[in-house]
């Protein structure tokens, strides 16, 4: 037997979607039906809207429906499942998996202040893991710093997830572990014996040529191709075709190659970041990630067309990588800045996943920041669709 995955969704407009426990039982039962009688090893639950007044009742309903070995989840500004997106309102999305002998080890990590910084407790050793899922609270967990540390401690291990994007109606953090609601830190699972194929679509199109950083200090780039960085960027922008100049009118982005040494780079090789600022007198620019001399960069622009193309291309590459094996399903962490506000239509990312991954069950949520690997190292992103694909 291979990995089996199911997804369920109820909304506040469904007959079963008003009462939080009843809604959760219905969504959990729908997800469990796809497991073919196998036990649920892992359930991931996302809760939005009025149900966050009683998240414990939601967890009680999911446990009643699935009796999962492990359950994690979080509050969400919006959810998705089964080709549908619920960007606002009340909803429960449930993802269930039977892991075919693999294991999901749950954890709750918390950040405690100490004299010389922050002490992280409860985070497992990820070295040797096949992957991990991470759902942090954005206010109480230093996700960026933790990801940088884990890149050194457990290189190559894919971490995927997203920042919780909604709190309880009392204003508390809403992270789920088993049948309990925890109000701070991060919850997640360490995966062993579970194959996971990560996909990060950053939704940005490269424009202009590749350029080499010739002088940098931390987050500040002083020179590009031997010229002051700001001068070089203005030169490139001035030489762009009219359409590309129009794209960057919505905000100029910088793509940095993380894993260098290739003869040529493709869209997925760049870590895309916004420009934090510029110093016209010094000719320098600042970006939201440390930059090193010799690193290759390229300007990027974000728009709905490039985001659509990028997601479809990224999913197609992963589907080809699976070969003859069908995808069992996927977990999706899409930015709360995407959806109909970016694409002008509903269900964009959910429908793209459904088509490209052959209708394999998918569930997820609209996150306040998405976690996924670029160049073998996991980062916290924005405006991305990050997907954990599980082969069958």
Image (spheres, helix red, strand yellow):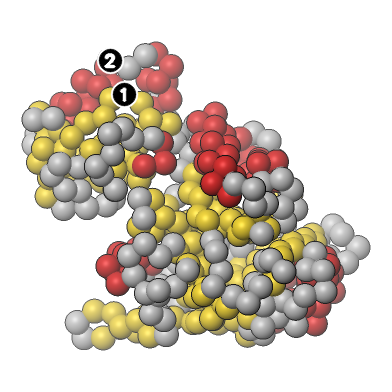
Residue carrying label 1: 208
Q: Nearer the viewer, residue 210 or 73?
A: 210
Instruction: Name the mark nearer the viewer: 1 or 2.
Output: 1
Label 1, secondary structure: give it. Answer: strand
Query: Quadrant location of residue 363?
Result: bottom right
Q: Nearer the viewer, residue 315 or 290?
A: 315
Query: Is residue 83 found left or right of 156 in the rendered image?
Result: right
Are the residues flagged by discs 1 and 2 in contact, CB closer than 8 Å? yes
Task: Return the mark for residue 371.
Answer: none
User: Vertically, is 277 above or below 246?
Assistant: below
Residue carrying label 2: 239
Q: What whole-number distance in Å separates the C-alpha atoms at marks 1 and 2?
A: 8 Å
Q: Nearer the viewer, residue 367 or 40?
A: 40
Residue 235 place in picture, x, y as percent: 21, 20
Residue 149 place in picture, x, y as percent: 29, 69
Q: Residues within 10 Å of mark 2 (few under 14, many from 20)?
A: few
Specify whether residue 320 is in view.
yes
Residue 368 place in picture, x, y as percent: 50, 57
Query: Quadrant location of residue 10?
Result: bottom right
Query: Is residue 158 found left or right of 274 in the rendered image?
Result: right
Q: Quadrant of the C terminus?
A: bottom right
Label 2, secondary structure: give it. Answer: helix
């Amino acid at each position: 037997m291979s990995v089996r995955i199911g997804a369920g969704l109820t909304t506040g407009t469904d007959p079963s979607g008003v009462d939080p426990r009843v809604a959760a039982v219905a969504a959990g039962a729908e997800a469990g039906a796809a497991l073919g009688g196998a036990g649920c090893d892992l359930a991931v639950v996302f809760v939005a809207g009025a149900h966050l007044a009683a998240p414990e009742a939601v967890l009680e309903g999911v446990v009643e429906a699935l009796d999962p070995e492990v359950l994690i989840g979080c509050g969400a500004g919006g959810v998705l499942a089964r080709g549908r997106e619920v960007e606002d309102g009340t909803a429960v999305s449930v993802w269930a998996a039977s892991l075919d002998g693999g294991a999901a080890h749950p954890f709750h990590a918390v950040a405690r202040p100490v004299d010389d910084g922050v002490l992280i407790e409860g985070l497992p050793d990820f070295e040797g893991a096949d992957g991990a899922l991470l759902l942090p609270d954005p206010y109480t967990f230093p996700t960026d710093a933790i990801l940088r540390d884990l890149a050194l401690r457990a290189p190559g291990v894919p971490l995927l997830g997203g920042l919780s994007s909604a709190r309880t109606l009392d204003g508390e953090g809403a992270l789920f572990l088993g049948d309990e609601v925890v109000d701070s830190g991060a919850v997640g699972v360490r995966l062993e014996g579970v194959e996971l194929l990560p996909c990060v679509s950053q939704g940005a199109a490269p424009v202009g040529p590749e350029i080499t950083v010739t002088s940098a200090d931390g987050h500040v780039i002083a020179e590009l191709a031997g010229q002051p960085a700001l001068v070089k960027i203005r030169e490139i922008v001035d030489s762009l075709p009219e359409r590309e100049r129009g794209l960057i009118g919505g905000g100029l982005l910088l793509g940095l190659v993380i894993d260098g040494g290739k003869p040529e780079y493709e869209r997925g090789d760049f870590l895309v970041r916004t420009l934090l600022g510029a110093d016209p007198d010094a000719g320098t620019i600042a970006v939201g990630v440390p930059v090193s001399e010799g690193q290759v960069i390229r300007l990027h622009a974000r728009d709905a067309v490039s985001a659509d193309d990028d997601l479809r291309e990224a999913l197609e590459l992963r589907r080809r990588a699976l070969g003859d094996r069908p995808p069992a399903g996927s977990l999706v962490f899409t930015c709360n800045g995407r959806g109909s506000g970016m694409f002008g239509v509903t269900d964009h990312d959910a429908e793209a996943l459904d088509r490209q991954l052959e209708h394999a069950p998918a569930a997820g949520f609209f996150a306040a920041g998405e976690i996924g690997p670029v160049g073998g190292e996991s980062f916290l992103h924005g405006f991305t669709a990050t997907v954990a694909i599980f082969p069958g």
